[in-house]
Image (spheres, grey):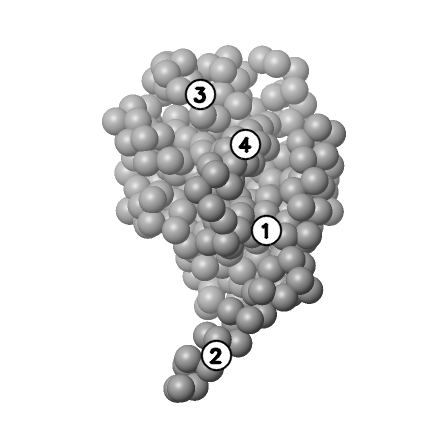
Amino acid sequence: MTSYENVCSSLLKALDESDNAVDKFVLRLKTDLSDLGESFLSGPSKMRPFLEAAECVLFQLETARNLSNQTSCGLIDSIEAEINIRVKTVLRKSISGIYTIIDPDAVNNRSLVEVTKSVISGGVRVIQYRDKVNDRSVFLENAQSIQEICDDAEVTFVVNDAADIANLVSAPFLHVGQSDLPVESASKLLGQARGIGRSNNGPIEASESEYSGADYLAVGAVYATSTMGKSSRTPVGPKLVQKLVQETELPVVAIGGIGAENLNEVRSTGVQSVCIVSSITMAVDPEESARLLVEIWNSGG
């Protein structure tokens, strides 16, 4: 008997034992399913721990599928569907209010961490970390720091473009552009309980992003802007944004050239969120600038 056959024989004997890893696995799965079910009823107190728990159970269910008969597999399918619906609901509801991007090129040479703390203190609800200049090790270190700040404040954290970094820090969201990884490909690199947002410059791109499985649609530039190299984009205007809001059930994030002078107009389109960068992160006092914009947003237009 070969060593491979010996290993297989030992494994089969282990599976026949009453006190074996399979029994322990099933017991753990039952406990985790029960805990996750309770959070469905009470609502997760913090998003990231909920997503991590859901991801763990989804992974366990895939293992259980390999140990189960046809009837059990049908039940597993039903449980997975319920968890995925809940995960998508939690993720999509978290995209709301004022959203800003922390980018080394748009913080006036200040600390990314300090600017992040300031804008969150001002009421920003979604933070995206975008970095096209630093080495990957620095990118990862900064992402970890910003993720921790967002966790403490219960603010949604998004990593721009880098699916590997998003995975390593367990970011709830990855954001991709039209020239980045396709949504379907990015989702294969992420955990099972993560969301993906995508940039769009019009209805055709937005429709394709929704069809491909995006969890929110960033639309713009709404107005002319030169922030982060987007001066060449033709503004889509608030009317087109309003049309897209009416045509999708996904959260829509308006972006580009938005500030205190036109925030009410954008708010009136029905978007769930607006992404504002230079008016916040380039301001002399990012916290106070964020607070002003949050007050305008919360006033309801």
- Where residue 282 appears, as percent x and y from the top left, is 55, 44
- Residue 200 horizontal side relative to residue 66, left or right: left
Residue at 46% across, 68% down = 135
The three-letter amino acid code for the residue at tag 1 is Cys
Would you say the residues marked 4 and 1 are in contact, meaning their CB atoms lie under 8 Å apart? no
Q: Judging from the image, what secondary structure is the residue with disc 3 in? A: loop
Q: Identify residue for label 1.
A: 56
Quarter where residue 46 is shown? top right
Q: Judging from the image, what secondary structure is the residue with disc 4 in? A: helix
Seen from the viewer's position, the closer of residues 165 and 2 is 2
Find the distance from the CA under tag 4 to the CA under tag 2: 37 Å
- Residue farthest toward the left in the current orientation of the protein: 204
- Residue farthest toward the bottom in the current orientation of the protein: 2
Would you say the residues marked 3 and 1 are in contact, meaning their CB atoms lie under 8 Å apart? no
Q: Identify residue for label 4.
A: 82
Q: Identify residue for label 3.
A: 249
Q: Judging from the image, what secondary structure is the residue with disc 1 in? A: helix
The answer, for residue 160, to whether it is visible in the render is: yes
The three-letter amino acid code for the residue at tag 3 is Glu
Asked if residue 167 is positioned above or below residue 86 in the image, the reply reads below
Residue at 63% across, 52% down = 26
Q: Judging from the image, what secondary structure is the residue with disc 2 in? A: helix
- Where residue 277 appears, as percent x and y from the top left, is 51, 39
Name the N-terminal-most of marks 4 and 2.
Answer: 2
Q: Identify residue for label 2.
A: 7
How packed is label 2: few (under 14 Cα within 10 Å), some, or many (20 or more)? few
- Where residue 154 appears, as percent x and y from the top left, is 69, 40
- Residue 102 horizontal side relative to residue 145, left or right: left
Residue at 49% across, 15% down = 270
